[in-house]
Every structure is written in C-alpha cells, then in structure tokens.
Image (cartoon, coloured by chain):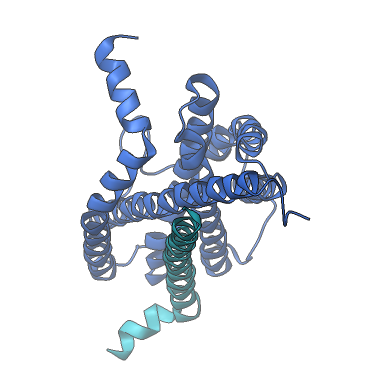
C-alpha cells in the first residue's frame, strides 16, 4: 500500500477521529435529510395521478425508496463485512452492525406499504411470487444477522460470525433485483433503473428521485448515530473489563 | 380539501402506508438517539468511577 493510502486508511480507521467527524457532520446531514424529505413529500402530493392506478400511486413515493434502501443497506452491510474480513478495518464491523436495524426497518416498510398497494391494484395483500418472497427472505436475513450479534458476547467473534452470514446472504440482493425479469410475477418490472432509461413519466419520476435521495440521507445520518453508539458501547465494555482485571476478578461471581 | 384526503377512493390504503412509514422511521430515529444518549451516560459514569478509584 502506498504511503498516502496507508495514511488515509489509518486516519479514517481511528475511531476517535471518526467520532469527531461524525459529530460535526450530524446537524448538516439531519438538516439535509429533513429538508429533502419535506420537498419530496410536497412534490409527491402535487404530482398528477397515474392514468391507470389513479391516486393509489401515491404509495409509490414511500414504497419504492424503502425498497431501494432495503437493498442498498444490505449491500453496505455485506460490503463492510467483506472489508472487515480482508483489511481488518476496525470500523468495518461497527458499520455493518449499525446498518442492520436500519435495513430491517426499511425492508419491513417496503413489504407493508407494498401490501397496502397490492390490495387495491392486484386484489390481494400478499402473493407468494418471486419479488415478494425474496424481499421477505431479506427481512429474515436482517433478523438472523441481528440475532447472531446478540447471541455472541465477544464483539470480534460476533462480527466474524455475523459477517459470514451477511456476505453469504448477499446472493439474495441480485435475486430481488432481477426477480421481476427471471420469473412471472404480479410485481411490475423495473421502471427507473433500466438499461434504456426510465420508463416512468418525468412528472412522477422526479418526486420519486427526491424521496429516494431523502431516504438515503436519512440512512447515512442514522448510520452515523448508530456507529457512534456502538463505538462508545465498546469503549465502555473495555473499561468494565479493565476494572474487573484490576480488582483481580473480585465481584465477578 | 376533502377530495385530497379521499385520495380518489384509495384513502384506506394511501394514508396507512404514509402513517406506518412515519411511525416506523420515527421510532427508529428515536431509539437510535436514545441509545446514543444511554451510551454516553454509561461511559461518563464509568469514567467518573475510574477517577474516584485512582490514587
């Protein structure tokens, strides 16, 4: 590794440095997230109704960003886990662990809002087709990952076990993305991120993209808060262990 | 105005979708900040305890 690169990694690898950067960035991130979401909501409700779906298309503005973030969050989690394995970066496991509950909430929201959209459009709250089922599997992966962290006391070992689950489970992300092309499904095919450009009218697309940016900013802001929390909790854990060492294990039992 | 709330007859689906999104994301934000505050408090208490122990 070159000198500059190694200096950069050590700089961002330093949890104390990270804490001070995260604290400075927080007000700006939260401000930007709230402002973008407010603008997105105004645009969403001012957008015209869909020519087939009428006003039910308003659900799209909370459903689609939640689903995007559910997958983005998992990719961050799996990517951070991989970085943890390869470079032993001290913040990688912290980032992966912190992303999981956020991803689980976005996945649950994508499922519930999709269900509320499915009822009036398809006539059913739930169908066992590829898109919906693979999304449900994603929720279970998140829950399993969170449970694994909770089950193992020692953070390094917990991070290693949970990291393997996160990386192996990543296979589900492309399955979700392409499920609408590979199998017959009630879910509509991709209409925004397609090879030949978006297939959705600009008047409906713009508010959706603004909401997507708002959800992404919210994710980053939340991730930093949870990473700060995790770093402080680990520091407290170390202090407690040191105290036990000094007292020669007294009061341990 | 009431036409807005009726959502073209889809009110029973549109508003719960927005309500649940707000409730779940709000709960996540609230719990995240509560967790950060608790971690800061615990660390402060530990530091204070260690200071008292030192000779």
Query: Going by the picture, which residue comes out furthest to the right?
Result: A253
| Residue B24: percent from left, percent from top | 49, 68
Query: Going by the picture, which residue comes out furthest to the top?
Result: A2
Supply the letter of whichever chain is cyan. B
| Residue B12: percent from left, percent from top | 50, 80
Q: Is residue A118 above or below residue A189?
A: below
State left or right for residue A153 relative to residue B43. right
Front in this rendered view, residue A56 or B47: B47
Q: Is residue A198 visible?
A: no
Front in this rendered view, residue B9 or A72: A72
| Residue A46: percent from left, percent from top | 23, 70
Task: State the count of labels.
Answer: 0
Q: Residue at x 29, y 17 (%)?
A: A5
Q: Residue at x 28, y 20 (%)?
A: A7
Supply the letter of whichever chain is blue. A
- The quadrant of the picture occupied by the N terminus of chain A is top left
- The quadrant of the picture occupied by the C terminus of chain A is bottom right
């Amino acid at each position: 590794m070159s000198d500059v690169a190694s200096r950069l990694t050590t700089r961002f690898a330093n949890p104390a440095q990270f804490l001070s950067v995260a604290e400075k960035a927080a007000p700006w991130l939260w401000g930007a997230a709230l402002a973008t979401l407010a603008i997105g909501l105004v645009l969403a409700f001012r957008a015209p109704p869909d020519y087939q779906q009428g006003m039910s298309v308003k659900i799209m503005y909370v459903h689609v960003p939640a689903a995007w973030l559910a997958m983005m969050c998992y990719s961050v989690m799996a990517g951070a886990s991989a970085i943890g394995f390869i470079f032993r970066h001290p913040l990688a496991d912290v980032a992966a662990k912190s992303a999981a509950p956020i991803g689980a909430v976005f996945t649950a929201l994508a499922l519930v809002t999709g269900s509320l959209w499915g009822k009036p459009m398809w006539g059913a709250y739930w169908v066992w087709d590829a898109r919906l089922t693979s999304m449900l599997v994603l929720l279970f992966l998140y829950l399993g990952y969170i449970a694994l962290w909770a089950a193992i006391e020692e953070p390094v070992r917990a991070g290693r076990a949970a990291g393997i689950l996160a990386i192996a489970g990543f296979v589900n992300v492309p399955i979700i993305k392409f499920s609408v092309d590979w199998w017959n499904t009630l879910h509509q095919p991709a209409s925004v991120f397609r090879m030949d450009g978006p297939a959705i009218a600009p008047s409906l697309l713009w508010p959706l993209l603004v909401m997507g940016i708002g959800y992404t900013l919210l994710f980053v802001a939340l991730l930093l808060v949870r990473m700060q929390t995790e770093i402080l909790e680990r520091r407290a854990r170390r202090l407690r262990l040191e105290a036990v060492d000094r007292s020669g294990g007294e009061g341990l039992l | 105005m009431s036409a807005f709330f009726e959502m073209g007859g889809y009110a029973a689906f549109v508003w719960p979708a927005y309500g649940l999104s707000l409730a779940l994301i709000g709960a996540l934000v609230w719990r995240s900040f509560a967790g950060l505050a608790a971690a800061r408090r615990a660390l402060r208490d530990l530091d204070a305890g260690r200071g008292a122990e030192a000779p």
